[in-house]
């Protein structure tokens, strides 16, 4: 929750005669963020008219810009003039509390209350928050509850006092979630009384964000910033909203807040937490250190420092910070909740579960803690325990959209079927389970064995593999919200992936996705989840490419453009490409770049170096130390080596791109056919001109011209395998001419680069079959099943091809698939029984046949086969 330092802005205009024009100008300057101008006016006016109202405004201006000590000096100056006055004691308490001087702050609030200062109700609120922050929850809630009586018993509360009531209701929401609505209603009343005050709007924005309503939060903060673009709390609020929404703009807003107030503790802590998410622990430590120099007991900063100690492997340092936090508040559930969130974001799911468990043990009303506990239990495969804690969380806080979405998803789990094997627990929606479990188990076992051999490490089993037919459900399982762009996620012991039915056919390869995630289970396990995100992703992409020709990311136009514009990141910045992208394609580019880093290490140092690097991360070493110890290179030296590697690999292709000198420029309209052809003729090394001219000639039916330009394009960028690739068009040209061998060669090159094009795979298999190459035809169709396994015709053809090749066990697999896809179950079981019989498994054949005859007792072919099986005669 919001700390006292940012709970309430100054209540201007509470005392004294009507303000002078100069004082009103100063107050307007504060409202509009012109703080230096306001300070000048306040200082000038203080000499002539040193009222509490003036000093409150002055102190608020100083607080907004981080000049807390000067604010305290101004209060002392006023008290020296008016030693009997308590009118600035509440304000003194705010500033002292912002400095972590808790006992002095408590005494100041008490003086304001006991002396019946005009803002004593606000002081009452601050004292209640102080008690809450100390873990004296019963006393704090009793004090908060009195604000409801104050509201019900008075019709003349000021705007500032109504905000105090609203904040009290916000705290009381932990005991009754309906009070969150009351808090918003009271804040609306406060705004109606004083439309010029930003305080109700900021508080409403923070409450909206706390209750997961980013849109209304944005509108609230934007309304403040439209009047005061330098409002530190509103700027931080926007940063938090942007982070909530996954936008990279969060960094811009928090930077602006710190430009206004460099000692803004909450903003420093927020920035430190963002840096922890980027795994930049040194920078995070520096930021949180600056926050703690301002307030050594900050509830926002201490858990971030504890997280840094934890993630750097300093358990002693972590314990010291933990002790410091608990000595301030022995019931600080918020400390552990923040640690749970950070641990989760850094893939330490077991530690996240432990921290959330500590949170709820300290505070039985920590609904956030129960939610964190439940979500992390789900990530660890503890489905029943997780659901129980999520339900408890949602009962206490029904506004948490993550928890609501996850519980809705869990309600669908009875529709899923679980297949348990020696290594895996395969969880697939019921209508798809009979088919998909066949291939998921086969692929998972192959991946497990290959990766175990490669890394000399066997990931703990069983591994739970969840397959979701709705991408929205997969996204909720992963984040709690729809809209995730990924295809799969690995939590270590649990993997969740999209079903091949979750996206349009030909959009992704489910098998390579599963392989990618199983590689994560290895690199996470080997390092006890300490491997940097970029390396784990890079190795997973590399292992995809190693698994099958065509799998995994390959070089594309976006990567070449980024390389040519020198937009690729250095090793120590590479995590930013995943976590804080600065342009739309950067995440995909970073996946490929990270895989190239892994390729280079393996090429020049051997795969043992990869294993040694992972071991270094397991020991808690930094990337700098790991690269130095294992490779004998500084990060700067490795970056230079990598740059040379990129030049070797991609200079030729990149030189064929004709990019605008200014990236933001670009043509306002597409070039005409004539312009493109002219470019293509004038510059044979212009890839885009060659490709587009060839495409247009193909569309116009001019095959000879098309072939000329498409061949040029292919020679300039042989790896280009996106839509409209030269390989596809050239294959069509050769097929039209009856040259099936050349057509197949072009398509073979294409599918060797493009793992997702289902139709291209089917076409290539057809060409190979016509050429009499049954082995290659079956291999290509097998790859097609990895893209989309729901077409019976593909499995039927595969069964036929496998039979001709004598691959009897594979025929059984395809007959099992056809059984799952057919509505004629009797015929399906019969065909499966024949496949088992031909494979020499008469017992399985008999069981399948009996299932067929249970459905259709008079099935003649089935009865004949049963008689044959029962006779014991060989077929």
Image: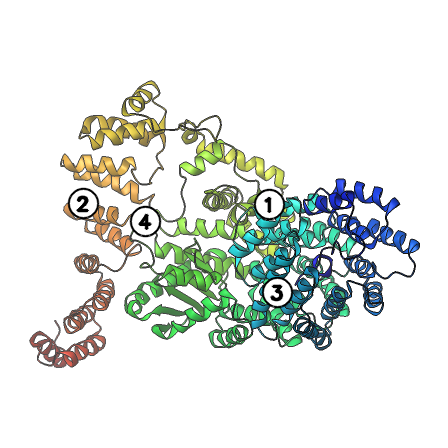
Q: Nearer the viewer, mark 1 or mark 2?
A: 1
Considering only order in the chain, which callout, 2 or 4, is on the residue closer to the N terminus? 4
Considering only order in the chain, which callout, 1 or 3, is on the residue closer to the N terminus? 3
Considering only order in the chain, which callout, 1 or 4, is on the residue closer to the N terminus? 1
Nearer the observer, 443 or 802: 443
| Disc 4: which residue | 756
Name the residue located 43 percent from the left edge and 30 percent from the top edge: 654
Distance between the alpha carbons at the discs numbered 4 and 1: 47 Å
Distance between the alpha carbons at the discs numbered 3 and 4: 55 Å
Q: On the rendered structure, is 712 left or right of 73?
A: left
| Disc 1: which residue | 226
Q: Nearer the viewer, mark 4 or mark 1?
A: 1
Circle on res. 186: 3
Q: On the rendered structure, is 530 left or right of 677?
A: right
Name the residue located 83 percent from the left edge and 44 percent from the top edge: 45
Q: On the rendered structure, is 481 left or right of 501?
A: right
Residue 552: image x %, image y %?
Answer: 40, 48
Considering only order in the chain, which callout, 4 or 3, is on the residue closer to the N terminus? 3
Q: Above or below — where is 302 with respect to 151?
A: above
Extreme residue toward the front, this view: 18
Is the C-beta separation of discs 3 and 1 under 8 Å? no
Circle on res. 767: 2
Distance between the alpha carbons at the discs numbered 1 and 2: 64 Å
Element marked by disc 3: helix
Distance between the alpha carbons at the discs numbered 2 and 3: 73 Å
* Residue 815 visible here: yes
Q: Assess disc 2: are there few (<14), some (14-19) or many (≥20) residues with their C-alpha within 10 Å of its C-alpha.
A: many
Q: Above or below — where is 831 with respect to 263?
A: below
Considering only order in the chain, which callout, 2 or 1, is on the residue closer to the N terminus? 1
Considering only order in the chain, which callout, 3 or 2, is on the residue closer to the N terminus? 3
Nearer the observer, 185 or 540: 185
Q: Assess disc 1: are there few (<14), some (14-19) or many (≥20) residues with their C-alpha within 10 Å of its C-alpha.
A: few
């Amino acid at each position: 929750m919001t700390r006292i330092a940012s709970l309430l802005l100054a209540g201007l205009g509470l005392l004294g005669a009507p303000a002078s024009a100069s004082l009103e100008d100063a107050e307007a300057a504060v409202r509009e963020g012109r703080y230096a101008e306001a300070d000048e006016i306040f200082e000038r006016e203080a000499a002539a008219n040193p009222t509490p109202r003036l000093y409150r405004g002055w102190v608020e201006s100083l607080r907004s810009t981080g000049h807390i000590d000067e604010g305290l000096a101004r209060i002392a100056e006023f008290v020296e003039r008016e030693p009997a006055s308590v009118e600035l004691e509440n304000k003194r308490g705010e500033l002292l509390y912002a400095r972590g001087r808790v006992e002095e702050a408590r005494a100041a609030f008490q003086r304001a209350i006991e002396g019946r200062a005009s803002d004593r109700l606000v002081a009452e609120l601050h004292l209640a928050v102080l008690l809450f922050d100390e873990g004296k929850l019963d006393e704090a809630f009793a004090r908060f509850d009195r604000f409801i009586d104050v509201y019900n018993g008075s019709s003349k509360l000021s705007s500032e006092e109504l905000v105090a009531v609203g904040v009290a209701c916000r705290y009381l929401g932990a005991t009754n979630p309906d009070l969150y609505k009351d808090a918003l209603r009271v804040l609306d009343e406060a705004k109606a009384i004083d439309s010029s005050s930003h305080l109700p709007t900021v508080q409403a924005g923070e409450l909206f964000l706390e209750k997961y309503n980013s849109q209304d939060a944005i509108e609230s903060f934007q309304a403040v910033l439209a009047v005061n673009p330098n409002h530190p709390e509103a700027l931080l609020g926007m940063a938090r909203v942007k982070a909530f929404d996954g936008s990279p703009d969060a960094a811009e807003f928090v930077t602006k807040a710190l430009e206004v107030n460099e000692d803004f503790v909450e903003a420093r802590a927020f920035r430190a937490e963002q840096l922890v998410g980027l795994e930049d622990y040194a920078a995070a430590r520096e930021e949180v250190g600056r926050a703690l120099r301002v307030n050594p007991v900050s509830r926002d900063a201490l858990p971030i420092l504890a997280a840094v100690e934890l993630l750097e492997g300093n358990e002693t340092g972590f314990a010291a910070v933990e002790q410091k936090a608990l000595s301030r508040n022995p019931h600080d559930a918020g400390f552990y909740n923040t640690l749970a969130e950070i641990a989760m974001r850094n893939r330490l799911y077991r530690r996240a579960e432990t921290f959330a468990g500590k949170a709820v043990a300290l505070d039985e009303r920590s609904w956030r803690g129960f939610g964190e506990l439940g979500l992390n239990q789900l990530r660890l495969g503890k489905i029943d325990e997780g659901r129980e804690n999520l339900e408890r969380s949602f009962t206490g806080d029904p506004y948490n959209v993550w928890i609501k979405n996850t519980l809705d998803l869990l309600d669908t789990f009875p529709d899923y079927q679980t297949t348990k094997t020696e290594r895996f627990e395969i969880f697939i929606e019921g209508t798809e389970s009979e088919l998909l479990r066949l291939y998921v188990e086969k692929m998972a076992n192959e991946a497990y064995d290959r990766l175990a051999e490669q890394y000399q490490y066997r990931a703990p089993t069983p591994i739970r593999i969840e397959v979701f037919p709705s991408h929205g459900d997969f996204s909720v399982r992963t984040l709690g919200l729809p809209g995730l762009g990924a295809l799969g996620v690995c939590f270590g012991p649990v993997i969740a992936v999209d079903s091949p039915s979750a996206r349009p056919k030909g959009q992704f390869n489910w098998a390579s996705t599963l392989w990618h995630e199983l590689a994560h289970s290895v690199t996470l396990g080997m390092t006890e989840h300490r491997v940097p995100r970029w390396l784990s992703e890079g190795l997973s992409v590399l292992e995809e490419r190693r698994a099958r020709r065509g799998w995994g990311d390959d070089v594309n136009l976006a990567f070449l453009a980024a390389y040519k514009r020198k937009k690729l990141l250095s090793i120590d910045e590479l995590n930013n490409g995943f976590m804080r992208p600065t342009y739309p394609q950067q995440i995909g580019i970073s996946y490929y770049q990270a895989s190239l880093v892994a390729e280079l290490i393996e090429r020049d140092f051997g795969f043992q170096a990869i294993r040694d690097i992972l071991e270094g991360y397991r020991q808690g070493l930094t990337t700098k130390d790991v690269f130095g110890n294992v490779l004998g290179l500084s990060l700067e030296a490795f970056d230079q080596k990598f740059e040379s590697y990129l030049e070797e690999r991609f200079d030729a292709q990149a030189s064929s791109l004709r990019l605008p000198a200014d990236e933001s420029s670009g043509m306002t309209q597409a070039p005409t056919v004539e312009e493109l052809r002219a470019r293509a003729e004038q510059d044979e090394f212009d890839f885009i001109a060659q490709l587009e001219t060839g495409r247009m000639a193909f569309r116009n039916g001019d095959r000879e011209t098309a072939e000329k330009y498409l061949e040029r394009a292919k020679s300039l960028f042989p790896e280009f395998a996106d839509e409209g690739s030269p390989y596809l068009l050239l294959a069509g040209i050769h097929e039209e001419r009856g040259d099936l061998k050349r057509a197949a060669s072009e398509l073979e090159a294409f599918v060797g680069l493009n793992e997702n094009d289902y139709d291209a795979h089917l076409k290539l298999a057809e060409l190979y079959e016509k050429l009499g190459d049954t082995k290659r035809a079956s291999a290509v169709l097998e790859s097609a099943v990895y893209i989309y396994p729901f077409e019976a015709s593909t499995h039927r053809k595969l069964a036929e091809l496998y039979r001709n090749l004598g691959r009897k066990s594979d025929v059984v697999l395809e007959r099992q698939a056809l059984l799952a896809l057919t509505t004629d179950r009797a015929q399906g079981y019969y065909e499966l029984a024949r496949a088992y019989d031909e494979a020499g498994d008469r017992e399985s054949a008999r069981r399948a046949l009996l299932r067929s005859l249970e459905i259709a007792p008079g099935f003649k072919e089935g009865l004949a086969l049963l008689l044959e099986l029962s006779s014991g005669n060989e077929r």
